[in-house]
Image (cartoon, rainbow, N blue to C red):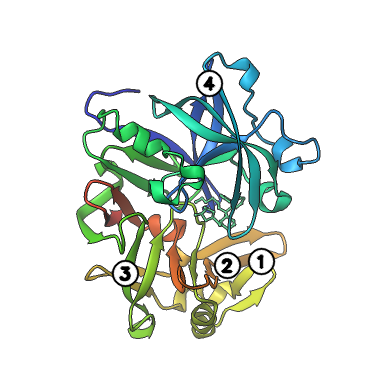
Amino acid sequence: NNNNNGTVPTPLTNYLDTQYFGEISIGSPAQMFNVVFDTGSANLWVPSQSCSPFSTACFTHNRYDASQSWTYVENGTGFSIQYASGNVRGFLSEDVVMVGGIPVVQVFAEATSLSAMPFIFAKFDGVLGMGYPNVAIDGITPVFDRIMSQHVLKEEVFSVYYSRDPKHSPGGELVLGGTDPNYYTGNFNYMDTREVGKWEVIMKGVSVGMEMMFCAEGCTAVIDTGSSYITGPASSVSGLMKTLGAQLDESGYKVNCDTVKTLPSVTFHLGGQEYSLSQEDYILWQSQIEGDVCTVTFRGLDVPPPTGPIWILGANFIARYYTEFDRRNNRIGFATAV
Ligand SMILES: COCCCC[C@@](O)(c1ccccc1-c1ccccc1)[C@@H]1CCCN(C(=O)[C@H]2C[C@@H](N)[C@@H](O)C2)C1
């Protein structure tokens, strides 16, 4: 819907509080795809009609068929992207991409091979990177940059709301060009990005309860809409988990659900403000047949220097703090989500 106030909303789906994605179309006539809007990367890819029959993850998702689109332009340059876990390989194509009703002629990747892990668990088809151009593979101009150059947005910002329980509707909302006051209260607190070109800020510490326990000398925090959890250096996270009495098993850190209400808040010191997560923000409570399972939504992840060591604040942080990504001023704003 091209409402004329220069802000464009896209409703998001929330799958189990761990996967948030929204619908875009590619091609003429429109071929629909669900994509994660990911501030931690800057390329658009979707599965390709020509993906290999051995790629199970490709076959269980919507696939782009260039032969059915009269606005398709061939490119053919190779493409590959590596995530913390999982990789995607394919080739570049160009076609009309519609995001929130805004059309852009976009170079994107047709994925011909998707690693089974983790993409067989993906409820979405592809990824639409909302990062800066300098992190885009093959030097491709990202979608949001193509939209900004059309001068249709009220402000050169985008904002993200992630709901906290899957039954809530909508599961979330991406706004291009502004913010949605329906999903936050109070004022925004802004902080400059650590360097122009990455959606990351300088963090001044991580406290557990009242005690500053990590990052006391300062560290980097990536604000990442494409991450399900919060990650930190493995040694810090294991120290944090010990404080919480959490045990690591094959699918993450678990606590006894009976102890959840006694757990301390975890506070992130960003831009002169303290952003606390209480136990209901960072515990994923799943009622299963063999009893309730309480997972702590923090993961250890050691990112090698020079990028790391870093903390990544993902969906469970954004669900508590409505986030505005400001490309005009290279800053990030947080407000309390409703
Ligand atoms: C909020 O919604 C998040 C979507 C889920 C992300 C994710 O949990 C996932 C789960 C199941 C299937 C696929 C993917 C997934 C995999 C790759 C890209 C996008 C989604 C990712 C699992 C691997 C680690 N991780 C990232 O590196 C992420 C980090 C991020 N910046 C991306 O670039 C890759 C998160």
Residue under numbered circle 3: 202
Secondary structure beneath dot 1 equals loop
Dot 2 amino acid type: Thr
Residue furthest out toward the left: 187
From the image, state whether disc 2 or disc 4 is nearer to you: 4
Indicate which disc, 4 or 3, sits on the residue closer to the N terminus. 4
Indicate which disc, 2 or 4, sits on the residue closer to the N terminus. 4
Indicate which disc, 1 or 4, sits on the residue closer to the N terminus. 4
Q: Which of the numbered marks, if any, corresponds to residue 251?
A: 1
- Estimate the spatial distance between the alpha carbons at disc 4 and disc 3, rounded to whole Å: 40 Å
Whether label 4 touches label 3, CB < 8 Å: no
Dot 3 amino acid type: Ile
Q: Where in the figure is residue 132, as x and y percent of width and height?
A: 38, 48
Mark 4 crowd level (few <14, some 14–19, many ≥20, 10 Å Cα): many
Residue under numbered circle 4: 27
Is 306 positioned to the left or the right of 32 in the image? left
